[in-house]
Image (tube, grey):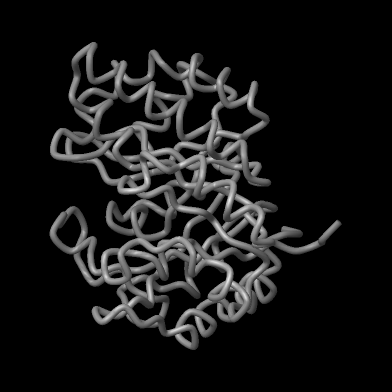
Amino acid sequence: MTDRNLVLASTGTFIGKANNADYTIIPGIYEKLHCDGIELLFMSVWKDRLNEIAKETEKSGVKIHSVHLDKMIGVLFSEGTDEDDNNALKLYEDNMYAASLTSAKTAVLHLWGGPKSDSQIHRAKKHLNQMYKIAENLGLKLTIENIPCVYSDPLSVWKILYEEYPRISFTFDTRFAAYHDQYMDIFKSSLWKNVEHVHVSSFNGKKNDIGFIRPILHYDEGIIDFEHLFSNMPGYKGKVVLESPALKEDGTINTDRLNKSLDYLYDSLKKYNTFNK
């Protein structure tokens, strides 16, 4: 049993359009990374092969600690119709089943997203009980991420969801929290106790400027003061996932860049004793 936070690399840091979402490169890249395992990002283009990809990646020997579900699930939930809700639930169930074919114990979900963002959150929250039952039956811990909002803010949405389902678990994302100038508010909130997963990346934008959430940057490239963030982060025993990509337009992957950021995460978590606070 480890006495420190596990540090993971999202496959989204090295798989994308530039290399045709080629999942077969995961084992080779993983061997070069300074991490405890990966978070397997389920990409929409994998939809028809998800079970196959999950099985093959698991058999490759890669340590899959968590899975990030298809982001289209949240977009569908935000459309606000019964048909879209049904489609979102079907996609969610398919994703969760595929996740259960791996050794992952945690699943990250975008419950809202797209142009309509959090406009339908009161409608989406009604499905939480069903979604958590599916997760529990498959042996997975479902966590809801604090993704950007247009009509409200992530912490306010978390509170709405908590009222519906007090056993809820959350994923805290540094970039999205900084986008809403909210990470200190989240740290001080009673809901921090429900945070069981952390995503780390930065950006170069301004508060509530949706156009500047991208590009997704590394800790030393963006506006987030990570020394301030980590020094103020309350006690946390969960996993920390690097989400800053190092995939170039020509499809090459800068593993040195990834390792620099992964090493920084290890050092920062140790420096601020996050695990044992």
Image point (42%, 59%), residue name:
174
Q: Position of residue 262 (x, y in %)?
A: 56, 76
Left or right position of 262 against 225: right
Instruction: Give the quarter of the image for residue 100.
Output: top right
Question: In this picture, is 64 found above or below 24?
Answer: above
Image point (32%, 70%), residue name:
19
Location of the C terminus by quadrant is bottom right
Q: Nearer the viewer, residue 212 or 185?
A: 212
Image point (55%, 22%), residue name:
132
Number of marks in the image?
0
Q: Position of residue 16 (x, y in %)?
A: 32, 64
Q: Position of residue 52 (x, y in %)?
A: 51, 44
Q: Nearer the viewer, residue 72 or 97?
A: 97
Left or right position of 255 against 18: right
Q: Nearer the viewer, residue 68 or 160?
A: 68
Q: Nearer the viewer, residue 159 or 26?
A: 26
Residue at the limit of the structure toward the right, as seen here:
1
Location of the N terminus by quadrant is bottom right
Image point (49%, 64%), residue name:
24
Question: In this picture, is 182 found above or below 218?
Answer: above
Q: Can the viewer see residue 188 in this picture?
A: no
Instruction: Give the quarter of the image for residue 158.
Output: top left
Instruction: Give the quarter of the image for residue 64.
Output: bottom right
Q: Position of residue 142 (x, y in %)?
A: 55, 34
